[in-house]
Image (cartoon, rainbow, N blue to C red):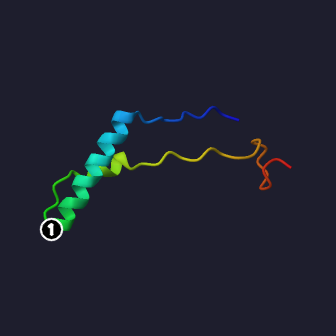
Amino acid sequence: MRNRRVQVSTGAERAHNREALKALVEGWASGRPTADVDEVLRCAEIPAAPVRGKGTGTAQGGI
């Protein structure tokens, strides 16, 4: 199985992400988008889930 890099967010990054999302939602609610949409989408990226199984290539996960 290959090593997978996992990105861990720091508390400061999570706080920044919350503020960016809050600004975007408030801007849309008022009819005046105020946040950079690309920045918010980047902040909202979800890392891929780890792959299950033993890497044998079988649909049953290594049976």
Question: Where's residue 12, x and y in %?
Answer: 34, 34
Expressed as whole percent of the image width and height from the top left, the position of residue 38 reads 27, 50
Residue in view at x 50 percent, y 45 percent: 47
Give residue 46's position: percent from left, percent from top: 47, 48
Figure quadrant of residue 22: bottom left
Residue 36 locus on image (x, y percent): 21, 51
Judging depth in this view, the residue of 57 and 7 nearest the camera is: 7
Q: Is residue 39 visible?
A: no
Q: Residues within 10 Å of mark 1 (few under 14, many from 20)?
A: few
Q: Nearer the viewer, residue 16 or 41?
A: 16
Residue occupying the point 15% across, 66% down: 30
Q: Is residue 31 left or right of residue 40?
A: left
Q: Quadrant of the N terminus?
A: top right
Q: Residue furthest left?
A: 32
Dot 1: what SS? loop
* 14 sits left or right of 53 in the view: left
Q: Residue at x 42, y 48 (%)?
A: 45
Q: Tell me: 32 left or right of 55.
A: left
Q: Which residue is mark 1?
A: 31
Query: Residue placed farthest to the right in the image?
Result: 63
Which of the 4 image quadrants contains residue 34? bottom left
- Above or below: residue 22 compared with residue 50: below
Q: Work out whether residue 15 can be spotted.
A: yes
Residue type pointed to by label 1: Gly
Q: Who is closer to the viewer here, 60 or 27?
A: 27
Q: Is residue 11 above or below residue 25?
A: above
How many numbered markers are drawn?
1
